[in-house]
Structures are given as C-alpha cells and as structure tokens.
Image (tube, grey):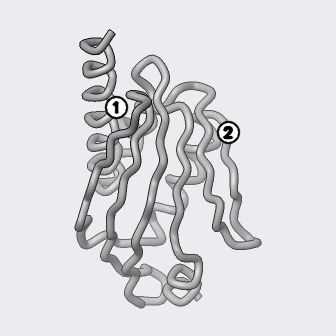
C-alpha cells in the first residue's frame, strides 16, 4: 500500500508542476487535458462579477482561456508543494508576478491551492487569493 501511495503522491506532484507550467505558458490545449472530464474548479474569494465554481472541462477551459489574456505573467516564485496524508491531495503555495494587460498595473499575487486528483487527473481544485490585489490591478 505504501508503494502505491508514493506512486500516487509523485503523480499528484508532477500533475501540479505541469499545471503551473502549462498555464503560465498559455498552453491551454495541453493544460485542459490535465483535468478530469467532470473536474471542479473553485475560487472561494471570487468577486461578485466572477464565477466561484466551474464544473467540467469545457467550462473550466472557456473561463481560463478568457482570463489568461488579461494577465501577463512575468514569473512564478516561491513555489512550494506540500504533501498531505492523502496521496491524491496536495497544497501549493506560490507567488505570481505579472501585469494586468488592460491597465498596465502590477499584479503580484500570492496563492494557496488545494488540489485533489482522481485516476491521474485533476478532479477538484480550490484556489485562494487576495481579491483586493486583483481589484487594484484590474480596475
């Protein structure tokens, strides 16, 4: 059982590293393939004009593709992956430095992500971030 847990944990870590790389590089067709068909993406701190829950690959890809053009990412820093007792769950901390494309304002945001995989795909993703930083950059 331990060997299987280690294999799943390594797969979960690799999945999240690929997630960050593909999203940062705007490789959306490859990125969406990391998701389970019925994956759920949640943004608990989303503003009133933003969705807080996306269901399924189509909805997730449409939203994230539209959002990707609103931000130029200069770098991902302080990337930390935290393993959990459940080999399918990982906590990720990271800082994104970038620029809001419409306003030219800096977007330097710290994220905490809780992700869960199922059958080697991303099944449930929750992303926590400061909505005040987003409002200042994009308003």
Q: Position of residue 25 (x, y in %)?
A: 28, 54
Q: Position of residue 77 (x, y in %)?
A: 23, 67
**139 lies above or below 123:** below
Which of the labelled discs sits on residue 12, or is there none?
Answer: 1
Q: Position of residue 82 (x, y in %)?
A: 32, 47
Q: Which residue is identified by label 2?
A: 55
Mark 1 lies on a secondary structure that is helix
**12 lies above or below 92:** above
Q: How far apart in space, not on screen, are marks 1 and 2 (Cα)?
A: 20 Å
Indicate left or right for 99 with 6 as reference: right
Foreground pick, 62 / 94: 94
Dividing the picture into quarters, in which one does residue 76 lie?
bottom left
Foreground pick, 106 / 87: 87
Dividing the picture into quarters, in which one does residue 68 lie?
bottom left
Q: Are marks 1 and 2 in contact (CB under 8 Å)?
A: no
**107 lies above or below 27:** below
Residue 33 can be seen, yes or no: no
Q: Residue at x 67, y 39 (%)?
A: 55
Indicate left or right for 13 with 71 as reference: left
Disc with the residue nearer the chain's start (1 vs 2): 1
Foreground pick, 131 / 37: 131
Q: Nearer the viewer, mark 1 or mark 2?
A: 1
Q: Residue at x 59, y 45 (%)?
A: 41
């Amino acid at each position: 059982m331990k060997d299987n847990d280690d294999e799943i944990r390594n797969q979960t870590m690799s999945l999240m590293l690929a997630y960050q790389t593909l999203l940062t590089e705007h490789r959306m067709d490859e990125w969406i393939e990391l998701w389970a068909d019925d994956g759920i993406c949640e943004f608990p701190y989303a503003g009133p004009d933003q969705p807080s829950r996306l269901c399924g690959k189509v909805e997730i890809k449409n939203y994230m593709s539209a959002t990707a053009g609103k931000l130029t990412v200069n770098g991902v820093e302080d990337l930390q992956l935290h393993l959990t007792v459940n080999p399918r769950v990982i906590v990720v901390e990271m800082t994104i430095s970038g620029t809001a494309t419409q306003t030219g304002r800096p977007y330097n945001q710290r994220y905490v992500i809780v992700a869960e995989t199922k059958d080697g795909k991303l099944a449930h993703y929750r992303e926590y971030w400061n909505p005040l930083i987003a409002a200042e950059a994009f308003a």
